[in-house]
Amino acid sequence: MSNNIDNSKLIDGKKIAAEIKSEIAAEIKLLEGEGKRSPHLAAILVGEDGASKTYVASKEKASKEVGFTSSVYRYPENISEQELLDAVNFLNNDPEIDGFIIQLPLPKHISESKIIEAVSPSKDVDGFNPVNVGKMILGFSTFLPATPFGIQMLLERSNVETAGKHCVVLGRSNIVGTPIANMLSRNASNANCTVTLCHSKTENLAEITRQADIIIVAIGKPFFLKADMVKEGATVIDVGIHRIEDKNSEKGYRIVGDVDFDNVAPKCSHITPVPGGVGPMTIVSLLSNTLKAYHENNK
Ligand code: NAP
């Protein structure tokens, strides 16, 4: 990220995530004061993938920071699909567990969709189960998928007007592009956008992005969104995360997004940096969903 960017444009995901975490922590303190148990978030981790281990560890750490209890159920790479289904069922039926996630990706011999479908919708805090996806599409109360939920909170807490605005979403994945396009097009608060959902077959992409008041980029290509694709005053949300070589950095690499930040930022009214934009919000959304599951399952 360049140092020449006007800080008032930056949507500070780290700061907003910290605010939400402290709100959750305050609520947990109140529950404890009433003698109630804390919410419990569990994770299923299969195999030894380094990135998956890191994600699960950061979810555990964030849970502890807000006063949740948490647990990780670790299984070897060669676990059978049936054994994993049994593990999911065990967590579905454990009354002490309010919500759990399956860390993806799973090994190739296991059907991810079968496992996701087996998670009880009332504990599916990732919001991936088809029942919860259906509820999201219909605008019913449900667990919203973590990254889109985080984006919506970022827009809300940065006072970015969405109603009546043209939002262009780049990328139609099931975990980011498709759900955020749906969420922002709903007749609801922090929504009511006119949404255009673009993908790799979209023609004249730059013409479309130049019409956008809000651009959400989730395509997985470093520096893809260039300044000439953005109109003056637009809000740009960068979901991409890439590690690229950087000989000037001590680590030998740096983290960048899907947006050519240094050239795009001067044209924007608001923009998320990478790192420190959307990323920190994803885990916070998971915590919010777990608190919701706790309240709903303990009515
Ligand atoms: P994905 O599954 O990798 O899908 C990429 C999408 O981009 C597809 O819909 C694809 O279109 C579209 N696309 C690819 N090239 C394109 C082009 N030239 N023009 C227009 N559209 C194009 O996406 P994802 O899982 O949402 O991930 C996207 C990025 O976000 C990755 O960098 C990922 O690491 C990051 N991510 C970050 C977070 C976070 O917490 N910050 C969370 C999730 C993902 P088709 O459908 O036509 O193939």
Image: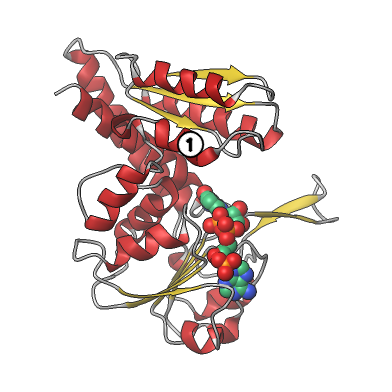
Instruction: Find numbered disc 1 in the image and state the secondary structure of the residue it sits on.
Output: helix
The front one of 82 and 98 is 82
Residue 83 at x, y percent in the picture: 55, 19
Q: Residue at x 24, y 15 (%)?
A: 32
Dividing the image into four equal quarters, which quarter contains ligand 1?
Answer: bottom right
Q: Residue at x 63, y 29 (%)?
A: 53
The front one of 269 and 198 is 198
Residue 46 to residue 248: above or below: above
The front one of 171 and 79 is 79
The quadrant holding residue 221 is bottom right
Ligand 1 within 8 angstroms of badge 1 C-beta: no
Q: Quadrant of the N terminus?
A: bottom right
Q: Is residue 251 left or right of residue 185?
A: right
Q: Residue at x 82, y 49 (%)?
A: 252
Residue 112 at x, y percent in the picture: 53, 39
The quadrant holding residue 111 is top right
Residue 30 at x, y percent in the picture: 20, 21
Q: Residue at x 30, y 18 (%)?
A: 38
Q: Residue furthest right?
A: 247
Q: Residue furthest top?
A: 35
Residue 81 at x, y percent in the picture: 57, 26
Q: Amino acid at mark 1?
A: Lys
Q: Is residue 280 left or right of residue 192?
A: right
Bin the neighbour count of mark 1 within 10 Å (Cα to Cα): few under 14, some 14-19, many 20 and up: few
Residue 170 to residue 297: above or below: below
Q: Is residue 240 visible?
A: no
Q: Which residue is mark 1?
A: 114
Q: Is residue 139 left or right of residue 194?
A: left
